[in-house]
């Protein structure tokens, strides 16, 4: 299977899983997070000279475990690597490349202190954070609709999430997101 068809097949798997009633985030996670992570991951891969296929596959699968099963949410970076391996084995994807995808998924978490050891994992961690900064309305939807927080509690949660996201960005990503980050903080702190 060529790279384009593989990426399309994985994209279909993640999108279909996002549509299921068991997905605690709702279909919005596909539209307002995963697809945005893919967009920024591809942009960063070009800027950093990373392996574009590894980056795109990792971006598609980085939150798959928590989409598939809410019990995996707290450790979704670890379970996500396991789920990615299962999916990629189903496509007879080379083990060495599967291991690179798994490494990206494990290293994408902003709330867990993890070193990013490759250009590809830097792309995924930064793209994940960029999506949070880019899609503040989806974070507001999460805190006010899904988690039913009050106005102050929700705003504080989003501010902390954005700060964690900003802190995990690589310099190239900070350059791209600076205006959106600063604007979001002004609005949320008012």
Image (cartoon, helix red, strand yellow):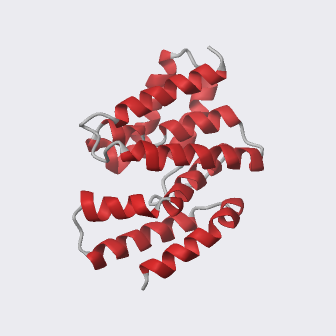
Please tell me which residue lies in front, 108 or 4.
4
Residue 38 x/y as whole percent? 57, 43
Say which of 101 and 143 sits in front: 143
Image location of residue 98, percent across then percent down: 57, 28
When the figure is inspected, residue 97 is found, relative to residue 148, above or below; the finding is above
Q: Nearer the viewer, residue 166 or 23?
A: 23
Quadrant of the frame with the N terminus: top right
Residue 125: image x %, image y %?
A: 57, 52
Q: Which residue lies furthest to the bottom in this view?
A: 190
Taking 35 as reference, is 30 left or right? left
At 69% from the left and 48% from the top, the residue drawn is 43
What residue do we see at 55% from left, 41% from top?
59
Q: Is residue 51 visible?
A: yes
- Which residue is more in the foreground, 22 or 49? 22
Residue 94 appears in view: no
Q: In this view, does 136 lie above or below 116?
A: below
**Residue 160 image-quadrant placement:** bottom left
The residue drawn where x is 53% and y is 60% is 134
x then y, percent, for residue 172:
72, 60
**Which residue sits at x=54%, y=48%?**
36
Q: Quadrant location of the C terminus?
A: bottom left
Q: Is residue 148 above or below residue 128?
A: below
């Amino acid at each position: 299977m060529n790279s384009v068809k593989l990426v399309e097949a994985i994209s279909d798997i993640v999108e279909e899983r996002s549509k299921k009633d068991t997905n605690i985030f709702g279909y919005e996670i596909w539209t307002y997070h995963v697809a945005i992570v893919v967009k920024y991951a591809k942009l960063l891969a070009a800027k950093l000279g990373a392996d574009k296929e590894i980056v795109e596959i990792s971006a598609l699968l980085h939150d798959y475990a928590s989409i598939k099963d809410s019990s995996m949410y707290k450790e979704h970076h670890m379970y996500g690597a396991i789920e990615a391996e299962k999916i990629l084995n189903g496509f007879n994807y080379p083990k060495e490349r599967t291991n690179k995808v798994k490494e990206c998924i494990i290293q994408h978490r902003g709330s867990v202190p993890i070193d990013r050891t490759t250009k590809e994992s830097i792309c995924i961690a930064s793209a994940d954070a960029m999506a949070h900064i880019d899609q503040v309305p989806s974070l507001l939807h999460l805190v006010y609709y899904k988690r039913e927080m009050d106005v102050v509690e929700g705003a504080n949660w989003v501010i902390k999430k954005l700060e964690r996201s900003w802190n995990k960005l690589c310099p190239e990503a900070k350059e791209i997101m600076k205006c959106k980050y600063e604007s979001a903080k002004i609005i949320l702190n008012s």
